[in-house]
Protein backbone atom coordinates (compact mmCIF):
# COMPACT_ATOMS: atom_id res chain seq x y z
CA UNK A 1 0.00 0.00 0.00
CA UNK A 2 3.04 2.31 -0.04
CA UNK A 3 4.17 4.69 -2.75
CA UNK A 4 7.63 6.03 -3.60
CA UNK A 5 7.37 8.64 -0.82
CA UNK A 6 7.13 5.85 1.78
CA UNK A 7 3.56 6.62 2.81
CA UNK A 8 0.21 5.08 1.93
CA UNK A 9 -0.49 5.29 -1.79
CA UNK A 10 -3.41 7.50 -2.75
CA UNK A 11 -5.57 4.73 -4.23
CA UNK A 12 -5.16 2.56 -1.12
CA UNK A 13 -7.30 5.05 0.82
CA UNK A 14 -10.14 4.50 -1.65
CA UNK A 15 -9.65 0.71 -1.61
CA UNK A 16 -10.01 0.59 2.17
CA UNK A 17 -13.14 2.74 2.04
CA UNK A 18 -14.68 0.51 -0.64
CA UNK A 19 -14.04 -2.49 1.59
CA UNK A 20 -15.72 -0.74 4.53
CA UNK A 21 -18.82 -0.12 2.39
CA UNK A 22 -18.94 -3.76 1.29
CA UNK A 23 -18.46 -4.95 4.88
CA UNK A 24 -21.29 -2.66 5.97
CA UNK A 25 -23.65 -4.28 3.44
CA UNK A 26 -22.51 -7.84 4.14
CA UNK A 27 -22.77 -7.39 7.92
CA UNK A 28 -26.45 -6.56 7.41
CA UNK A 29 -27.14 -9.60 5.23
CA UNK A 30 -26.76 -7.88 1.89
CA UNK A 31 -24.13 -10.26 0.56
CA UNK A 32 -22.99 -10.47 -3.04
CA UNK A 33 -25.25 -13.51 -3.44
CA UNK A 34 -28.26 -11.59 -2.09
CA UNK A 35 -27.54 -8.64 -4.40
CA UNK A 36 -27.32 -11.06 -7.34
CA UNK A 37 -30.66 -12.56 -6.30
CA UNK A 38 -32.20 -9.04 -6.16
CA UNK A 39 -30.47 -7.98 -9.40
CA UNK A 40 -29.21 -4.92 -7.52
CA UNK A 41 -25.81 -3.52 -6.82
CA UNK A 42 -24.28 -0.23 -5.73
CA UNK A 43 -22.69 1.86 -8.48
CA UNK A 44 -20.44 4.89 -7.93
CA UNK A 45 -20.73 8.10 -9.93
CA UNK A 46 -17.92 9.99 -8.23
CA UNK A 47 -15.26 9.59 -5.59
CA UNK A 48 -13.37 12.57 -4.20
CA UNK A 49 -10.49 12.33 -1.76
CA UNK A 50 -9.00 15.08 0.37
CA UNK A 51 -5.68 14.08 1.87
CA UNK A 52 -4.94 15.61 5.26
CA UNK A 53 -2.06 13.71 6.90
CA UNK A 54 0.19 10.97 5.62
CA UNK A 55 -0.11 7.37 6.74
CA UNK A 56 3.32 5.81 7.13
CA UNK A 57 4.56 2.23 7.35
CA UNK A 58 3.37 0.59 10.57
CA UNK A 59 0.52 3.07 11.12
CA UNK A 60 -2.88 1.60 11.79
CA UNK A 61 -5.97 3.21 10.34
CA UNK A 62 -9.64 3.46 11.25
CA UNK A 63 -12.21 4.19 8.56
CA UNK A 64 -15.66 5.46 9.46
CA UNK A 65 -18.77 5.58 7.30
CA UNK A 66 -21.58 8.13 7.35
CA UNK A 67 -24.50 8.86 5.07
CA UNK A 68 -24.27 12.39 3.65
CA UNK A 69 -27.34 12.40 1.38
CA UNK A 70 -30.06 10.13 0.10
CA UNK A 71 -33.02 10.75 -2.15
CA UNK A 72 -36.40 10.09 -0.47
CA UNK A 73 -36.78 6.85 -2.49
CA UNK A 74 -33.23 5.69 -1.67
CA UNK A 75 -32.27 5.52 -5.34
CA UNK A 76 -29.27 7.87 -5.07
CA UNK A 77 -26.98 8.46 -2.11
CA UNK A 78 -23.77 10.06 -0.94
CA UNK A 79 -21.46 8.68 1.71
CA UNK A 80 -18.51 10.16 3.54
CA UNK A 81 -15.55 8.35 5.02
CA UNK A 82 -13.04 9.81 7.37
CA UNK A 83 -9.78 7.92 7.68
CA UNK A 84 -7.92 8.27 10.97
CA UNK A 85 -4.40 7.20 11.83
CA UNK A 86 -3.66 5.21 14.96
CA UNK A 87 -2.73 8.44 16.77
CA UNK A 88 -6.26 9.75 16.14
CA UNK A 89 -5.27 12.33 13.54
CA UNK A 90 -7.42 12.57 10.45
CA UNK A 91 -5.55 11.32 7.38
CA UNK A 92 -8.19 11.72 4.66
CA UNK A 93 -11.81 12.46 3.84
CA UNK A 94 -13.40 10.50 0.99
CA UNK A 95 -16.80 11.48 -0.43
CA UNK A 96 -18.58 9.10 -2.80
CA UNK A 97 -21.84 9.49 -4.65
CA UNK A 98 -23.70 6.56 -6.08
CA UNK A 99 -26.96 4.78 -6.64
CA UNK A 100 -28.60 1.39 -6.71
CA UNK A 101 -28.23 -0.21 -10.13
CA UNK A 102 -30.58 -2.84 -11.54
CA UNK A 103 -28.25 -5.34 -13.19
CA UNK A 104 -30.97 -6.64 -15.55
CA UNK A 105 -32.65 -3.37 -16.58
CA UNK A 106 -29.22 -1.67 -16.56
CA UNK A 107 -30.61 1.43 -14.92
CA UNK A 108 -30.74 3.23 -11.59
CA UNK A 109 -33.70 2.11 -9.46
CA UNK A 110 -35.12 2.58 -5.98
CA UNK A 111 -34.12 -0.30 -3.70
CA UNK A 112 -36.45 -2.26 -1.40
CA UNK A 113 -37.41 -0.46 1.82
CA UNK A 114 -35.12 -2.63 3.95
CA UNK A 115 -32.12 -1.43 1.93
CA UNK A 116 -33.23 2.20 2.25
CA UNK A 117 -33.52 1.73 6.00
CA UNK A 118 -30.02 0.23 6.21
CA UNK A 119 -28.61 3.47 4.83
CA UNK A 120 -30.80 5.65 7.03
CA UNK A 121 -29.57 3.71 10.07
CA UNK A 122 -26.00 4.89 9.36
CA UNK A 123 -24.71 7.85 11.31
CA UNK A 124 -25.52 11.02 9.35
CA UNK A 125 -23.09 13.79 8.49
CA UNK A 126 -23.81 17.21 9.99
CA UNK A 127 -24.81 18.41 6.53
CA UNK A 128 -27.02 15.42 5.63
CA UNK A 129 -29.66 16.20 2.99
CA UNK A 130 -32.26 14.48 0.85
CA UNK A 131 -31.69 17.01 -1.94
CA UNK A 132 -29.43 16.33 -4.91
Image (spheres, rainbow, N blue to C red):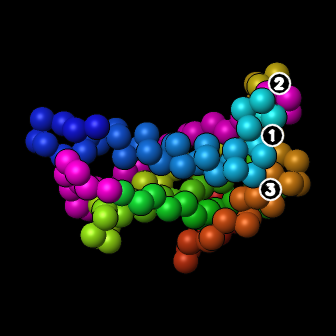
Camera sees residue 131: no
| Left or right of 77, for residue 29 | right
Which x, y percent locates residue 84? 35, 63
Q: Residue at label 3?
A: 116
Q: Does 12 sit left or right of 67 as displayed?
A: left
**Could you tell me which quadrant the C terminus lies in?**
bottom right
Reply yes or no: does residue 50 show up in magenta: yes
Where in the figure is residue 77, as x and y percent of width and height? 66, 53
Give the SS element for disc 2.
loop
SS for dot 3: helix
Q: Give the range drawn in magenta.
A: 36-60
Residue 109's label in the rendered image is: 1
Compared with 56, 40 (above or below) is above
Confirm or deny contact between disc 3 and disc 2 (CB under 8 A): no
- Is label 3 or label 1 in front? 3
Q: Residues within 10 Å of mark 3 (few under 14, many from 20)?
A: some
Q: Which of 77 and 87 is in front in this view?
A: 87
The x and y percentages for residue 87 are: 27, 70
Per the image, the residue denoted by label 2 is 105
Vertical relation: 15 (above or below) 127: above
Reply yes or no: does residue 100 show up in magenta.
Answer: no
Residue appearing at x 62%, y 71% in the figure: 124
Mark 3 and mark 2: Cα distance apart in space: 20 Å
Pair 3/2: label in front:
3
Which of disc 1 and disc 3 is earlier in sequence?
1
| Identity of the residue furthest to the top in this view | 104
Amino acid sequence: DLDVNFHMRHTAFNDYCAQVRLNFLQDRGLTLEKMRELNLGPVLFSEYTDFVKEVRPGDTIKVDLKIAAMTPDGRKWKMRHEVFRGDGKKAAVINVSGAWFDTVKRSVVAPPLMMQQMFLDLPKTDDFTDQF
